[in-house]
Image (tube, grey):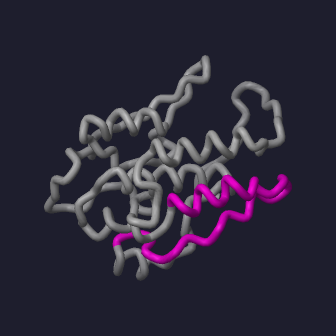
Amino acid sequence: LCEALAFAHHRRVIHRDLKPENVMVGSFGQVYLVDWGIAQVNGQAEDMIAGTPGWIAPEQARGEVCDARTDVWGLGALLYYCLCGRRPNRELTLQERAATGADARPVEPPTGIVGRPPPPPELVRIAMKALRLDPAERYQNPVALANDLQLARAEGWWFERQVFPAGAIIVRQGL
């Protein structure tokens, strides 16, 4: 995903709708980023707010100009989802969402999935940096995030390996 976004950003295109439904994995492990329907050219302002509530970056929800850091927030949200099986700040009330347009308070660190080992601390750190409210405090682009992921992997983090039968539900959205 980081590579796909780095290529898009090189072409000045911001995806703006990163969520599990827009990530597909092929039969040989290849990853596809789909649904570029609300993508925009970097630096262009819009008259309306677009994106999936609960998955969009705070600045996007406020109708501000989006850039690479907006998609970095989306990558952080996806990593967060992988670590704990839920999106960031899912417990916001409807009134809070209506007032802000999205999750506009700091994200709580992921605690993991019940019955499984806690997520690796380095991956939690990476997710939390990507999910900072202030875009200036996030990774500045997907390449910087990918570099940290590669360093963390080289230092030995890993997930417990599990085998699932074909067709098994591994994670269900909305939990």
Q: For this rendering, which residue is in front, 108 or 170?
A: 108
Task: Determine whether, in the image, residue 69 is placed left or right of residue 171.
Answer: left
Extent of the magenta region: 101-130
Name above or below for residue 130 compared with residue 89: above
- Identify which residue is drawn at 53% across, 54% down: 76
Q: Is residue 123 magenta?
A: yes
Q: Nearer the viewer, residue 85 or 169?
A: 85
Is 168 inside the magenta-drawn segment? no
Which quarter of the figure is the C terminus placed in?
Answer: bottom right
Res. 86 image quadrant: bottom right
Query: Looking at the image, which is closer to me, 59 or 87?
Result: 59
**Looking at the picture, how far across and down is residue 90, in whole percent?**
55, 68
Estimate the x, y position of residue 145 in percent, counting from the top left: 52, 48
Relative to 138, residue 40 above or below? above
Which of the pair 168/82 is nearer the observer? 82
Dominant SS of magenta comes to: loop
- Residue 109: x and y in percent read 65, 67
Residue at image coords 41%, 75%: 97
- The relative height of residue 164 versus residue 149 in the rendered view (above or below) is above
Q: Residue at x 41, y 49 (%)?
A: 141
Residue at x 61%, y 17% (from the top left corner)? 28
Q: Is residue 125 left or right of residue 2?
A: right
Residue found at the far top of this picture: 28
Relative image position of residue 142 (x, y in whole percent): 45, 45
